[in-house]
């Protein structure tokens, strides 16, 4: 689907975390982001959304959230636990 | 005149070939019927067959799915395809970022070059550190991948007798016992590595090429998934197969009252579901002596049945020598993209 160029990583996270079939995972992510499912793979639409939410995107601006920083936000946006985020909190003593 | 028009397509080894519409339809029908007969599954509908013909004969070196039908992707040995296989001097954690930020992959897996869990066991501490770095830098899900690879547990490299040597000697009971013992060794290793990767922050485990050593190999993967899910319910697991058919190297192994030998994808997926896998990766082997129309019709017939039977996402293997694509080091993009389109739009898969 294009990974962080689009919403591919987000859709895949719902498959991996909740065993959602593609249609269900796309619907879930689209509803959260406020777009229709056809837009999820559209890098033009998704770039703006990813920049606004600061959840990681290619060719990032300076100061943009990257790596684990972006995953903290993705975990909140999607409402799922991300293992590395939970581990970060534990190791940093903030959980 | 029109009937004599020939379309460019390929053989199962990637060689280019020109075929008439009648020849393509005839090969498609034979491939589809072969799958239906072997798997005891429905043939493709008339509508599916017409659309598949349209895809096979579509012009353009690369074809794509309709807008809105894009699917996500997982990988096997994703990270070392750049470093070890493409031979680019690059660390695996850098490869994760190239896959994420340049190639636009939806996820990627890290694996040891040997890609066997038995090999990883003594170096888990080092593999875990690679995962920790990757998780700090990546946004996309990063899984840890490898194969159950049951054959590695045989002597002289492993602890049990080699059933492939015992069977020809007529030592049947010994061969069965050796496989059963190997299953327990493999399960222990798979769970141990999953524990380590869960601690390192992995998004999931990819058990790839399950069933490569037969039904005992598949059983080891299923048992491991079940145990890992009990310990780490939030850790995602993808279970991918080695071939379309589970070989009965043992023949009397069962999981949840289902005999494993002889299962095709639509039945394999039900066991993956029961074990607790989040994603299932079916395989259909390519016959390099047959044409692409034969292979893709056969593969789509198997995978459509699998997708219809499944309650979890189905990420079909569409790569070198599987999923309708030619068995070639560099599979031609024209037929690879057509295979992917057919899998998405006809077999209704959830990912590649």
Image (tube, grey):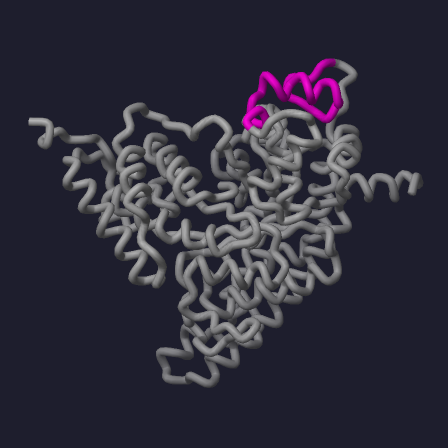
Horizontally, is B250 left or right of B327 in the view? right
Please say if B223 is above or below B72: below
Front position in the image: B67 or B130: B67
The residue at the point 58 percent across, 59 percent down is B273
Front position in the image: B101 or B112: B101
Q: Main secondary structure of the magenta part?
A: helix
> How many numbered badges does the structure rendering display?
0
Horizontally, is B290 left or right of B244 in the view? left
Front position in the image: B102 or A4: A4
Please say if B235 is above or below B57: below
Q: Does the magenta portion include A41?
A: yes
Q: Does the magenta portion include A45?
A: yes
- Quadrant of the rendered image containing residue B219: bottom right
- Quadrant of the rendered image containing residue A35: top right
Please say if B62 is above or below A15: above
Horizontally, is B311 left or right of B318 in the view? right
Image location (x, y in percent) of residue A7? 62, 29
Which residue occupies the extreme left position in the image?
B1
Q: Quadrant of the N terminus of chain B?
A: top left
The residue at the point 31 percent across, 23 percent down is B60
The residue at the point 54 percent across, 56 percent down is B147
Image location (x, y in percent) of residue A62? 75, 14
Image location (x, y in percent) of residue A38? 55, 27
- Extent of the magenta region: A38-61
- Quadrant of the rendered image containing residue B37: bottom left
Image location (x, y in percent) of residue B148? 55, 60
Horizontally, is B327 left or right of B172 in the view? left
Front position in the image: B252 or B63: B63
């Amino acid at each position: 689907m294009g990974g962080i160029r689009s919403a591919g990583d987000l859709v895949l996270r719902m498959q991996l975390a909740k065993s959602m079939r593609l249609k269900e995972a796309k619907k879930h992510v689209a509803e959260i982001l406020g777009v229709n499912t056809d837009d999820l793979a559209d890098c033009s639409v998704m770039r703006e959304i990813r920049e606004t939410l600061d959840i990681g995107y290619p060719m990032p601006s300076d100061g943009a959230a990257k790596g684990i920083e972006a995953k903290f936000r993705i975990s909140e946006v999607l409402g799922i636990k991300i293992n590395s985020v939970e581990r970060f909190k534990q190791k940093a003593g903030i959980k | 005149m029109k009937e004599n028009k020939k379309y460019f397509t390929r053989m199962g080894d990637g060689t280019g070939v020109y075929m008439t519409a009648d020849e393509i339809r005839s090969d498609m029908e034979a491939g589809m019927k072969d799958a239906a007969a072997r798997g005891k599954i429905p043939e493709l509908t008339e509508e599916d067959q017409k659309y598949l013909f349209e895809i096979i004969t579509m012009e353009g070196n690369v074809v794509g799915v309709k807008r809105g039908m894009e699917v996500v992707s997982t990988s096997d040995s994703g990270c070392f395809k750049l470093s070890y296989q493409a031979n680019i001097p690059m660390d695996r954690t850098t490869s994760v970022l190239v896959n994420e930020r340049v190639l636009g992959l939806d996820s990627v897996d890290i694996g040891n070059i040997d890609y066997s869990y038995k090999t990883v066991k003594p170096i888990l501490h080092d593999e875990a550190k690679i995962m920790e770095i990757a998780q700090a830098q990546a946004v996309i899900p990063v899984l840890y991948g490898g194969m159950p690879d049951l054959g590695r547990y045989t002597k002289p490299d492993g602890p049990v007798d080699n059933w492939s040597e015992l069977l020809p000697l007529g030592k049947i009971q010994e061969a069965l016992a050796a496989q059963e013992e190997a299953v327990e060794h493999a399960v222990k290793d798979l769970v141990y590595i999953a524990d380590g990767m869960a601690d390192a922050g992995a998004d999931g485990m990819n058990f790839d090429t399950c069933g490569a050593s037969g039904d005992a190999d598949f059983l080891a993967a299923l048992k491991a998934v079940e145990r890992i899910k009990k310990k780490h319910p939030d850790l995602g697991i993808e279970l991918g197969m080695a071939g379309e058919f589970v070989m009965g190297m043992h023949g009397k192994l069962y999981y949840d009252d289902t005999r494993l030998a002889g299962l095709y994808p639509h039945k394999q997926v039900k066991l993956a579901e029961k074990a607790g896998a989040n994603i299932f990766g079916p395989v259909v082997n390519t016959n390099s002596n047959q044409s692409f129309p034969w292979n893709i019709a056969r593969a789509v017939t198997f995978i459509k049945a699998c997708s219809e039977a499944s309650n979890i996402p189905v990420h079909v293997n569409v790569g070198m020598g599987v999923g309708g694509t030619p068995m070639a080091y560099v599979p031609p993009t024209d037929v690879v993209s057509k295979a992917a389109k057919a899998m998405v739009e006809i077999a209704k898969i959830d990912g590649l």
